[in-house]
Image: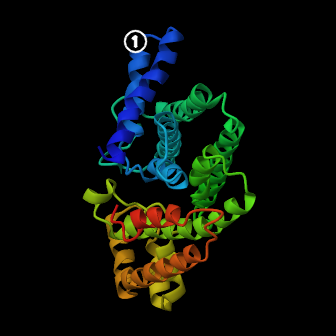
Amino acid sequence: MSDKLEFLKVFPILAEEFLDIAREYKFPAASVEWIKKNIYHNVPGGKLNRGLSVVDTLKIIKNNQVSDEELFKAQVLGWCVEWLQAFFLVADDIMDQSITRRDNPCWYRMDGVGNIAINDSFILESAIYFFLKKHFRDEPYYINLIELFHEVTLQTEFGQLQDLLTAPEDHVDLNNFMALAMRMAGIEEELAYKHAKDILIVLGEYFQVQDDYLDCYGDPSFIGKIGTDIEDNKCSWLINQALDRASSEQRKLLDENYGKKNPESVAIVKKIYRDLELEALFKKYEQDSYSRINDLISQLDESLINREIFTTFMGKIYKRTK
């Protein structure tokens, strides 16, 4: 069975553990069912790369000598990452007034949900700390896990504020996801975490630029959502490149049409992107980033951390289409 299928098998176990808490609180059956729908609609439908990276990293660090208990714990941590992502996405979709997510209507757009989705996002976040307490409370690295999740939450919320204020792009810190597995594996050498961060910051930038590119050029049937960065006035990589290269006439058109929620304005912006050949510019950026990241990986001291951790993750995201 593939790692992804093994990972997916753990999800209903965790979902039921969390629903049991709601039942213990004597919630009405309808409320428990609501939480279940919230969980199943929002958590498991993504690509799962973030969660699987925790499992992959632990296996690589331990040369595949992972016990069944260690594997399960790594899968739980991976699902905590996916729960965290779901919490962010439910809230983000409300703020952006997005239409679809993962081939389905956004949760807040489902019948009868609306602004209840705000509280539902909080429930998804709370589940993370329930799982960490249940499965890791007696582990020596428990506090490290708590702090990592708090840290990435704070960073992401700061990044979301930047995004909403149309400031620089979100900061995607992949370092924290891999750090979960490194803590679990007992790696204490801080230099290993520094080397990991140096590479993963560059990987995170590449990952974010990919997201911006796919929002405009990706096929919605592949990426599972309709891109709305232009309508939402997002400070994406594409608009930054366009502003840097636009003629005075093109700049005027961008000022008049970017951030407008109508198809005509979006079409004008996309035509300018085509005229400026931003698709080809991204392809060059992608190849340059790939070379730069591989150079950084090749310089790693393998006595501190295995290079395969980074080549495995790079293989999953390089030239992705969703």
Q: Is 100 left or right of 178, judged from the image as shown?
A: left
Measured as percent of width and height from the top left, residue 32 is found at: 43, 18
List the single residue furthest toward the top. Answer: 26
Vertical order, 299 against 304 (above or below): below
Q: Closer to the camera, 313 or 1?
A: 1
Q: Can residue 259 be seen in this view?
A: no
Q: Closer to the camera, 123 or 145?
A: 145
What amino acid is labelled 1 in the image?
A: Ala
Q: Which colour scheme is used?
A: rainbow
Q: Is residue 209 visible?
A: yes
Measured as percent of width and height from the top left, residue 91 is found at: 51, 43
Vertical order, 133 against 322 (above or below): above
**Residue that badge 1 annotates:** 29
Q: Is 151 left or right of 306, judged from the image as shown?
A: right
Give the number of marks: 1
Q: What element carries label 1?
A: helix
Q: In which quarter of the image is residue 139?
A: top right
Q: Residue at x 49, y 50 (%)?
A: 59
- Label 1 Cα neighbours within 10 Å, binned few <14 / some 14-19 / many ≥20: few
Q: Is 11 left or right of 252, judged from the image as shown?
A: left
Vertical order, 21 against 254 (above or below): above
Q: Which residue is drawn at 50% across and 46% down?
A: 85
Measured as percent of width and height from the top left, residue 245 is found at: 50, 88
Measured as percent of width and height from the top left, residue 184 is found at: 61, 43
Q: In which quarter of the image is the C terminus?
A: bottom left
Q: Residue at x 56, y 73 (%)?
A: 297
List the single residue furthest toward the left. Answer: 221
Q: Residue at x 58, y 71 (%)?
A: 202
Q: Closer to the camera, 136 or 254?
A: 136
List the single residue furthest toward the bottom. Answer: 247
Q: Quadrant of the N terminus?
A: top left
